[in-house]
Image: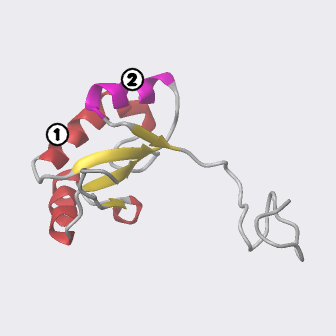
Amino acid sequence: MGDRPIEFSVFTKPWKTMPLPELGRFVSRLGFDAIELPVRPGFQVEPQDVARGLPQAVRQFAEFGVKVASIAGPTDEAAIAACAEAGVPIIMTTGGGRTGPRGGRGWRRGRGWPPN
């Protein structure tokens, strides 16, 4: 861990409809240092607006002492450029299918986890 303090972050997906300033205040009051911000259709920052929306979101969260530690969204050129401009170091992605114990791609019933 070194000399860096531990920072706690939260994924803001549950608060999809909360305006950014209100979300920044809320997350700060919960005691989090940072967030993972969804960049998805219907969320505060949408993929088609990431170049403008992400830097704006980072500034708004900073007003409450909250960093945007990562986004959960596309890995296209626009998102990568917006992250670079806004200082967001991580883009989280998913495989797009269920791979857990309830079934779906990569899972065979009756076998142990993780699938072979």
Residue at left offset 46%, top offset 45%: 40
From the image, which quarter does the N terminus lie in? bottom left
Q: What residue is pinned by disc 1?
A: 59
Identify which amino acid the numbered label 2 is placed on: Ala
Q: In the image, 94: left or right of 13? A: right
Which residue sits furthest left?
Answer: 63
Residue 69, x across and y down, in percent: 33, 46
In the rendered structure, does residue 81 fall within the stretch colored magenta? yes
Does residue 88 appear in this view?
Answer: yes
Residue at left offset 27%, top offset 57%: 7
Query: Element at badge 1?
Result: helix
Does residue 39 appear in this view?
Answer: no
106 or 59: nearer the eye?
A: 106
Residue 29, x across and y down, in percent: 15, 68
Q: What residue is pinned by disc 2?
A: 81
Residue at left offset 55%, top offset 45%: 93
Residue at left offset 34%, top offset 63%: 15
Q: Which residues are magenta?
A: 77-87
